[in-house]
Amino acid sequence: MQTMYSSFGKQLVDKKIITQQQLEEALHRQQTTMSNRKLGEILVRLGYLSKSQIIEALAEQLGLPLIDLAERDIPPRIRALMEGSIATLYRVVPLEERGSTLIVATSDPTNINTLDNLSRLLDRPIEPALATPEGITEALGRYYGHQKETVESMLSSASSASSVSSLSSFSNLGSGASGSMGSFASLSADDMSIDSIDLGDAQETMATVGDVQDDSPVVRYVQQLIVEAYRLRASDIHIEPGKTTMTVRYRIDGVMQEMPTPPKRAQSAIISRLKIMAGMDISERRIPQDGRIKMSVGAKDIDLRVSALPGVYGESVVMRILDKSGLLLGLGQLGFCAEHQVQWERLIRHATGVVLVTGPTGSGKTTTLYGSLNTLNTPDTKIITVEDPVEYQLTGINQVQINHEIGWDFARALRAIFRQDPDIVMVGEIRDQETAEIAIKAALTGHLVFSTLHTNDTASSFTRLIDIGIKPFLVASGVRAILAQRLVRTVCNGCREVYQPAEIEKDRLEMDIDWSTVRLEHGAGCESCNETGYQGRLGAYELLLTNDALRVMLMRGESATALRRQARIDGMITMREDAWNKAKRGLTTLEEVNRRTRVDEPLIRTEKADSETKAHPAMPAPAAAGAER
């Protein structure tokens, strides 16, 4: 795919449609601030090309016919060859038959997964033709709009008298014999085209499971709930029972948003359906359960990590959507500023020692670690990870799953994996003294060890390790760097505009800013961003590199405040400064900077502090015992 788009860019330059400089700028944007955009879309957004020019050039590049769907009338017989739910999900429009082959219009003919999935679903060969995204949208509305089933319509159906029996029969599943449910191993394409559900080793143990109809309102609602969450880029789905109602919320870009509410009497059926899909025991409602669902939504393979928690008014279910396509990013796609990216890449490629990534749950630590491991994952390097749980399976990396029930914890796993001759180790989290000591001692013998801590900033990670019992000299000599991070929402490109922030937001920043020279942007709200003004997130980072001055202070038992102050004197960019720089570039808003980062204390350099640092001999940096990576 990357090769195709590289040659596509070269073709545009060769035909003098754009200049080489414009292509290089677009490619740079693709690697940094617009990593989720295709080259053609970036060129259009930069104003170098029109949409029609991109489509025409792409059609010529791929040798495909360019279809004007507004001028084409598709017979009912052809439209009937594809369900509206499939056409809408895959964003394709059937055009004609040529023997056994179905020709479909698509705006992304390079997406082989979509074409393969369609071919498998329809059990026939598929050939693409090219159409504009606007043409696809208009044609889908014209031909299939009446078939589009929304969450609201399904809930209405579920609430109707004709649906009560199906809801009741589905609810009865919870009163049967015990055991994990393994039914519904595959769902029909009519139910929003979730192609497959992998229940692992779950086995069917109740005959009544087979009586549930795949076209019941509950089945359709659950499937649409997941598909809609994925479409809106939600990271989590929350289903929360109340006394007389139940609430459904999505977490989108870190913020909870409430969705249409199902009727209370559908609660048991919906939760039972989800537990079946996740391979849980639906007869057990007294203890928490965890499960997993693997599925294809359109052309994307996603995992859902499912947690069921008993409550006063019933079980609460939370599903974490694990999308691999958003995880295996290159270092240029993590949102680092230029200085951070150079420092981080130099660090992980040439360092030995412990490298910590800190931040609260949901701050993007896993994405940063996996992106770094993905960069280092080469045939001449052995990488082993110890995780709880293993969220994503990574090709070429040995991943170890923690199992506390049998005593297989982080410390025990670490001792074992260092006998496997690794070059690089990633520990999911340092939770106790034993794990920390093993990791640091391994780092001192020439390994590069990645791990995470739940601390608010970089400097407090030093004191956290000392607080759990690690000796200061081990912390000083073993920890090579600490990266603290938060995720800030990015301004929607579809509705961005220049704005003047409120005075209260300016005051909250607590920086000495000449506001007359600052140009900030925000999103006005549009359909693309669901009227929020934001679409996507990127990291705000604070990277502390351990140096001699900090090692001396650690040995003296200095506070986290003093360590942080020294790091800033040495040139560390704080998280708030990094976020503010991104706001000035139009990537995020001042409101997000204030919401996600804390105020920096005024930095006052004193001669006393400088002289104290110079008065203590610097400790040598830990020797690199292994070959550089």
Image (cartoon, rainbow, N blue to C red):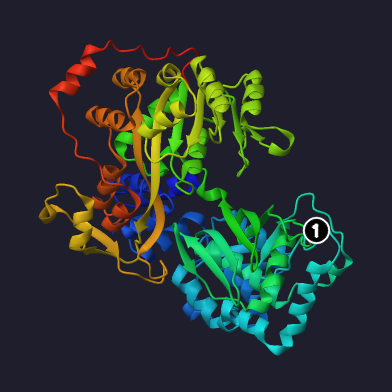
Answer above or below: position of 273 versus 40.
below
* Residue at image coords 34%, 61%: 493
Q: Nearer the viewer, residue 120 or 153?
A: 153
**Hey, which quadrant is residue 617 in on the image?**
top left
Report whether 360 appears left or right of 490. Answer: right
Q: Which residue is mark 1?
A: 182
Please, what is the three-letter code of the amino acid marked with disc 1? Gly
Report whether 72 appears left or right of 418. Answer: left
Q: Position of residue 377 (x, y in %)?
A: 54, 31
Report whether 548 appears left or right of 391. Answer: left
Answer above or below: position of 102 versus 596.
below
* Residue at image coords 68%, 76%: 266
Query: Could you classify mark 1 by the number of other residues whose Cα lies within 10 Å: few (under 14), some (14-19), or many (20 or more)?
Result: many
**Hey, which quadrant is residue 241 in on the image?**
bottom right
Q: Position of residue 347 (x, y in %)?
A: 40, 26
Secondary structure found at label 1: loop
Q: Nearer the viewer, residue 590 or 118?
A: 590
Answer above or below: position of 243 versus 610.
below
